[in-house]
Image (tube, grey):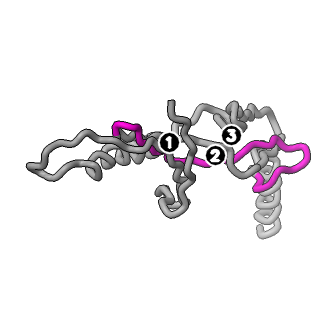
Amino acid sequence: MRAICGFLAGVAALGLAGCAGLQFNDTPRPGALSYFEPAPYLLVTVAADCTSTASVLTFPGAPRSVTFHNGYGSASLSVTLSAAGTIATVGQTTDSQIPATLGAVAGLATAAAPLALSRPIGATPQPKACAPNATLYPFLANGRPDIADPVRVPLNPR
């Protein structure tokens, strides 16, 4: 009985090892499809009239690769890359909540910026004048913008 159970376990292990799939690698490898890990940034801009906007941008990050493995039977594996070289879809169209979450963070930054520029109650409104600027904040692993390490973006006033 033990021999039969051992044999069946061995056959099951070989069957599972033969499954088709994708292997994601931390570094580019020969024969693998190379891509870039997406690196999200929060872009905050302030105009001359002191209005601020915030939006989430994605830039190519660290280089990675994905290897396609064939298995027993037929498989339909696919990876679609964006124009920037990041993965757009894997095998099927995905609908993650990451873009919605990053968009919500950008919306909070836009909503909070006027609070910092508001005048005290009863004060006479003064014409606002700000130096136009733009700043990129990389996102940390916990999903929060890294305000300690901003990237200033030079603007050309018109």
Residue 35 forms part of the magenta stretch:
yes
User: Judging from the image, what secondary structure is the residue with disc 3 in?
Assistant: loop
**Label 1 belongs to which residue?**
56
- Residue 51 is left or right of residue 37, and the answer is left
Comparing labels 1 and 2, the label whose residue is closer to the camera: 1
Callout 2: 10 Å neighbours few (<14), some, many (20+)?
A: some
**Label 2 belongs to which residue?**
38
* Range drawn in magenta: 25-49
Q: Position of residue 92 (x, y in %)?
A: 63, 32
- Residue 94 is left or right of residue 54, and the answer is right
Residue at far bottom of view: 2
CA gap, disc 1 and disc 3: 16 Å
Q: Earlier in the sequence, mark 1 or mark 3?
A: 1
Residue 140's quadrant in the figure? Answer: bottom right
Residue, x 61% and y 48% (percent of image)?
Answer: 39
CA gap, disc 1 and disc 2: 12 Å
Q: Earlier in the sequence, mark 1 or mark 2?
A: 2
- Label 2 near label 1: C-beta < 8 Å? no
Residue nearer the viewer, 96 or 13: 96
Q: Does residue 68 appear in the picture of this structure? A: no
Residue at far left of view: 122
- When the figure is inspected, residue 155 is found, relative to residue 117, above or below; the finding is above
